Amino acid sequence: MRFLRRALVGLFLMALTIGLLAMAGTTIYGALQARWSEEGVPQPQRERVFSAEVAPLDFGTETPVLTAFGEVRSRRTLELRAPAEGTVIELAEEFEEGGAVSAGQVLMRVDPAEMQSARDTTAADLRDAENELAEATSAVELARDDVAAAQAQADLRQRALDRQLDLLDRGVGSAAAVETAELAAATASQAVLSRRQALASAEARVAQSETALDRRRIALAEAERMLARTVLRAEFDGVLSEVNVVAGRLVNRNEQVANLIDPDALEVAFRISTAQYVQLIGEDGSLPDARVSVILDVFGLDLTAGAVLTRESGAVETGQSGRLLFARIEEPRGLRVGDFVRVEVEEPPLDNVARLPATALGSDGQILMLDAEDRLEAVAVQLMRRQGDDVLIRAPGLEGREVVLARTPVLGAGIRVNPIRPTEAEPPPLPETISLDDDRRARLIAYVEANGFIPADVKARMLDQLQQDEVPTQMVTRLESRMGS
């Protein structure tokens, strides 16, 4: 038993020694493997190639279009105010919101009773003044005849005095007769003077009567003007808005009752930034007679009217920036005052520029060009204009080279790409017109007819197009988007 116990202990110690040696050998071998892997030659890796849409640069002449938003206004807007105080006794049939009136048409009449009475009283006073003048004129004529008679009598008395003096010189007369003749001549002269004074008084009365007559005429003209003010007439052809009066209402003088708008003298006011303004003006600092397109978006059937840039605001309003420009609309069919429209202004043409998507230009002002090995090269270009989702650039010497149309974070200089040409990247174009089934057509027609914000002429054209076999795709898409389809 003792021998067996010693044999088992020895066997156990041997097995433990072998296990420790095996563990040590495994540790040494793992350390050697790690060292060998660090000192070995790395395995070659394959270069990553990204796909990118490219297109050749084509330089030419482009006409930039400045886009802004503005409001349609009328160049002739007149506030209609009550010309007199009183009760409204008559209104024109067209005197309502949106009513079309013509120049000179009677729009409103105020009760003229008081004005008519004042006018009749002034007319009676005028007749009294005319009668007074006629009487004064007759008195002048009589006074002149009286002066003539007195003068004739004085001449007669003077001849009698001369005769008595002649008789006295010849010794056949008497001094008493001469004295009597002298007294008679003096009395006749005094009578002539009195008659002249009466004539002067009569002439002064005529002058006063003429002045009074002029005053009466002025008063009559004023009364007739006040009577005429009881009638309100249209100054020009236009459309009424903001009507707030009805027949029978008592109005005050100068109270606003409506606005008269000339629908054919419309203009659009729009604001642009100072940078856009600098690009638009000419070398002399004046605005060019640029063509302007005024566009009102109506469910895919845009209302477009031509306009001409006319002027700019004289000052910048408080709290505003940029410049306020005005363009005269030439044919404002379908446009109304207050419409919010999109304005497109043609700027002076630019030569030697290329049009690219805005995604092709980086924030650093560089584009990625494709070299002969399909690797990307960053090239700095000059940004001329931004046109919606496009940009206009100028880069001499790059004619015909291919540029990446859409930059992504993984694309940069030196990266190799798999170029996708336009012929490979273009999706099939959508058809301009589509056919509608009966249910779909009926829904669209019902929606257009129930919409009260669409102008009547535009609604008629939309309904006419919806009745056709082929309907514009853009109009259908916009209508259905607003219907919630």
Image (cartoon, helix red, strand yellow):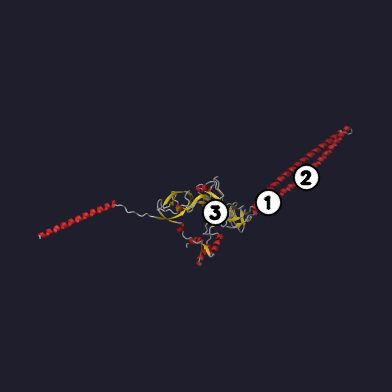
C-alpha span from label 3 to label 1: 61 Å
Q: Secondary structure at mark 1?
A: helix
- Above or below, 291 against 198 in this view is below
- Residue 214 in view of the camera: yes
- Rendered image: mark on residue 121: 1
Task: Say which residue appears at 80% left-offset and 38% top-offset.
Answer: 189
Q: Nearer the viewer, mark 3 or mark 2?
A: 3
- Considering the numbered disc 2 on the image, is that residue within a helix, a strand or a loop? helix
Answer with the quarter of the image where residue 158 lies: top right
Cα distance between the residues tagged 1 and 2: 31 Å
Mark 3 touches mark 1? (CB < 8 Å): no
- Give the CA separation, mark 3 to mark 2: 79 Å
Viewer-proximal residue among 222 and 338? 338
* Residue placed under numbered mark 3 in the picture: 293
* Kind of residue indicated by mark 3: Ser
What crowding class fits label 1: few (fewer than 14 Cα within 10 Å), some (14-19), or many (20 or more)? some
